[in-house]
């Protein structure tokens, strides 16, 4: 068996890097390469440039809406924060004074205020990728009850797992959730073949054969595998073996396609482009924002990836005297985020990608109206925000929804996490009322609340 990566490290499907690219894995389960390519040929055809894409930027921990996009300058002391709102190039839209660059391009943004996140006091990453909470959180309004597939896995299942050039259609930069070390981006009953291809710097740096294995020899091994069919597949009820085969086939594509390998290499970007996004501040500090992740996301959608997920920073700002409290933390992080977002959105627009790419940024909850003594803000699920940009045909330059004077809850119509994800499915050309059969064969709706955000469709 030929191993292409030598170091032992867990990859996205929980196989080790050593096991993942053993050439013999392509024959594992008796599904030979011709079988895989026949299956791939049966996937729905996609027009590369017409295909819409989404970049989802997660702000883990729960970002404070009061310091970012829903400031309350007239609220009593103890609720209003230290930052002032500034006007943008959209009349009536005000955002944080630490977002001056976004204020210049607010006509490319849509801010949804008062989003309800269902769960209080729970960091459920699964919530923003599936619309459902953890299966063990049965007391919540919309619990998982069962593990649900991440929206990227749904896209892969319904629209195809890879592009014509071999680029995965769904790429995650969030290794801890995509590989199952948490409650985030699990494919569940969408199938193991539709797990996110997980971006990880050290892994992608090694995305090449070892020195003694040329691409020609690799092709020889691939031809050799056509004759292998050694393992009974009738016990593979959930398709796990076929899923591993599909991942292994995709690894061959990655190894043999220069275009794919280059898409993952941020160093290929001119310094002038990288400078647009800014530089990481306080590198190594917990919660620091890395602009290179946003640049990588742009490279991936430009190369044909339809779903890209990433996380930046750390936003669980309960505050502490040691860290200087929430306001000192945000004074360091928000300007870096501002420049990175400005760089991403202007870059997409200059390349004409804004017509095809939507950017969604949010966290798994908001923060409390009341400022605690640390000073900081605690968990608050009743009201947070969702940030849309680019649009891919959606009307931008608007604020959607309103919260009450204290910022506790939405006034009037209330949108939920599932409404946000229904909007995402709509962007990607998927009917939110679609179903996928679970492991028992019973059809499961993608969402229970299937209405997209009216103002965006």
Image (spheres, grey):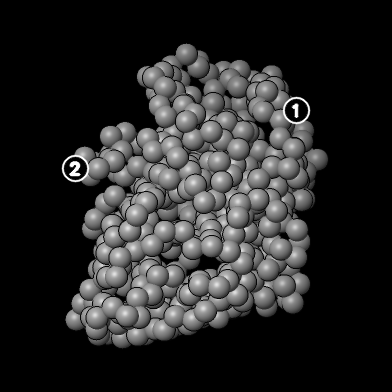
The vertical placement of 209 against 38, above or below, is below
- Name the foreground residue: 42 vs 69: 69
Residue 238, position as x, y percentages in the image? 44, 23
Whether label 2 touches label 1, CB < 8 Å: no
Question: Considering the numbered disc 1 on the image, is that residue within a helix, a strand or a loop?
Answer: helix
- In the image, what residue occupies the spot 23% across and 44% down? 140
Q: Earlier in the sequence, mark 2 or mark 1?
A: 2
408 and 336: which is toward the camera: 408
Q: Is residue 84 visible?
A: yes
- Residue drawn at x 59%, y 59% is 396
Compared to residue 198, the image places residue 148 above or below, namely: above
Give the percent coordinates (x, y) of residue 2. Answer: 64, 39
Q: Going by the picture, which residue comes out furthest to the right?
A: 216
Q: Nearer the viewer, residue 331 or 162?
A: 331
- Describe residue 277's horizontal placement relative to residue 63 as left or right: right
Q: Relative to 285, is 404 above or below? A: above
Q: Name the quadrant of the N terminus.
A: top right
Instruction: Determine whether, in the image, residue 80 is placed left or right of residue 419.
Output: left
Residue that numbered label 2 is attached to: 139
Other residues around mark 2 within 10 Å, as few (<14) / some (14–19) / many (≥20): few
Residue at x 70% of width, y 53% of height: 355
SS category of the residue bearing label 2: loop
Q: Residue at x 75, y 28 (%)?
A: 223
Q: Pointer 1: what residue?
A: 223
Q: Is residue 5 visible?
A: no
Q: How many marks?
A: 2
Q: Position of residue 289 (x, y in %)?
A: 49, 72
């Amino acid at each position: 068996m030929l191993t292409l990566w030598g170091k032992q490290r867990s990859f996205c499907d929980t196989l080790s890097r050593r096991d993942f690219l053993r050439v013999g894995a392509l024959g594992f389960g008796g599904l030979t390469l011709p079988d895989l390519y026949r299956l791939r040929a049966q996937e729905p055809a996609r027009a590369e440039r017409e295909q819409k894409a989404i970049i989802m930027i997660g702000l883990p921990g729960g970002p404070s809406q009061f310091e970012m996009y829903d400031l309350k300058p007239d609220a009593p002391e103890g609720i209003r924060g230290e930052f002032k709102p500034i006007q943008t190039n959209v009349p009536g839209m005000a955002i944080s004074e630490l977002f001056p660059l976004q204020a210049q391009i607010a006509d490319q943004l849509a801010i949804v205020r008062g989003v309800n996140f269902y769960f209080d006091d729970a960091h459920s990453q699964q919530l923003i990728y599936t619309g459902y909470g953890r299966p063990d959180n049965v007391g919540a309004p919309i619990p998982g009850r069962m593990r649900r597939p991440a929206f990227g896995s749904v896209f892969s299942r319904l629209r195809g797992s890879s592009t014509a050039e071999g680029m995965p259609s769904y790429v995650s930069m969030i290794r801890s959730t995509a590989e199952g070390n948490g409650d985030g981006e699990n494919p569940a009953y969408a199938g193991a073949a539709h797990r996110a291809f997980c971006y990880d710097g050290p892994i992608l740096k090694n995305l090449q054969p070892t020195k003694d294995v040329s691409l020609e020899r690799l092709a020889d091994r691939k031809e050799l595998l056509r004759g292998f069919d050694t393992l009974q597949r009738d016990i593979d009820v959930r398709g796990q073996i076929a899923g591993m085969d599909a991942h292994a086939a995709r690894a061959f594509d990655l190894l043999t396609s220069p275009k794919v390998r280059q898409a993952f290499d941020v160093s290929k970007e001119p310094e002038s482009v990288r400078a647009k996004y800014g530089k990481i501040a306080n590198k190594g500090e917990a919660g620091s924002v890395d602009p290179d992740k946003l640049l990588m996301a742009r490279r991936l959608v430009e190369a044909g990836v339809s779903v890209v997920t990433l996380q930046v920073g750390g936003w669980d700002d309960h505050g502490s005297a040691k860290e200087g409290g929430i306001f000192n933390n945000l004074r360091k992080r928000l300007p870096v985020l501002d420049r990175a977002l400005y760089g991403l959105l202007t870059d997409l627009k200059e390349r004409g990608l804004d017509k095809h790419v939507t950017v969604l940024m949010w966290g798994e909850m908001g923060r409390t109206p009341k400022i605690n003594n640390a000073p900081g803000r605690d968990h608050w699920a009743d009201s947070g925000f969702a940030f849309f940009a680019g649009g891919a045909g959606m009307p931008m330059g608007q604020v959607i929804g309103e919260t009450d004077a204290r910022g506790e809850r939405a006034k009037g119509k209330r949108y939920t996490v599932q409404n946000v994800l229904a909007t995402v499915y709509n962007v990607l050309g998927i009917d939110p009322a679609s179903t996928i059969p679970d492991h028992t064969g019973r059809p499961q709706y993608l969402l229970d609340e299937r209405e997209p955000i009216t103002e965006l469709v």
